[in-house]
Image: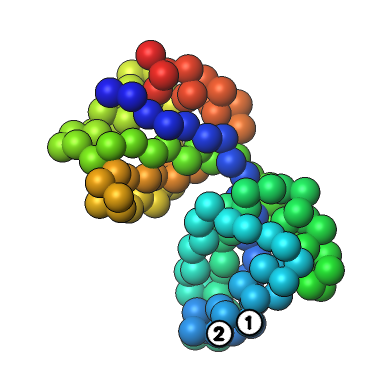
Amino acid sequence: MTFNILQVEYYNITVQSQITDASNLISRIAAAGVDFHAFKATPLESDRTQFTFFAKNSSKMTEGAQKAGLNLDGPYPALLVKGDEKAGALADIYERLSKAGIQVDEAIGIADINAGYGVLLYLKREDCDKAVVVLNM
């Protein structure tokens, strides 16, 4: 199975607001010229939310957050793995990583987008290069 693999970095921002207030935060960062591969919002409490941004350009993310007056936590490493939608594709990814002793700390996936899928794998920095090699075998 062939994968399209991209090493990415993500940043967390925790704010005093609810997920429904995300448009303000996203607009502030986007106004600084930042584009994203993906984003995730997780409620921490009723009035606090952690946003995770997978920026296409890490330096723009850092500069954009500074311009917007935001405090970033990160960057942290991840892999964005994309491929053609086939039964068992995700299982194949996890099997390869498991056999290589690579621990996935967290994952987010989506399927059936233009007949394909994508999964973001949160990994330790030292495992990213190894995971790329393993998935390209």
Screen quadrant of the N terminus: top left
Q: Look at the image and tell me whether residue 109 can be seen.
A: yes
Amino acid type shown at disc 2: Asp
Q: Which residue bears the numbered disc 2? A: 21
SS for tag 2?
helix
Asked if the residue at tag 1 contacts the one at tag 2, i.e. Cβ–Cβ closer than 8 Å, the answer is yes
User: Label 1: how many residues lie within 10 Å, few (<14), some (14-19) or many (20+)?
Assistant: few
Q: Position of residue 60 (x, y in %)?
A: 76, 54
Q: Is residue 118 left or right of residue 13?
A: left
| Disc ID at residue 85 | none
| Residue at position x 58%, y 56% in the image | 36
Q: Position of residue 63 (x, y in %)?
A: 82, 58
Quarter-wise, where is residue 34 in the image?
Answer: bottom right
Quarter-wise, where is residue 100 in the image?
Answer: top left
Q: Is residue 105 left or right of residue 109?
A: right
Which sits in the foreground, 119 or 97? 119
| Disc ID at residue 24 | 1
Q: Look at the image and tell me whether residue 103 can be seen.
A: no
- Give the CA distance from mark 2 to mark 1: 6 Å
Amino acid type shown at disc 1: Asn
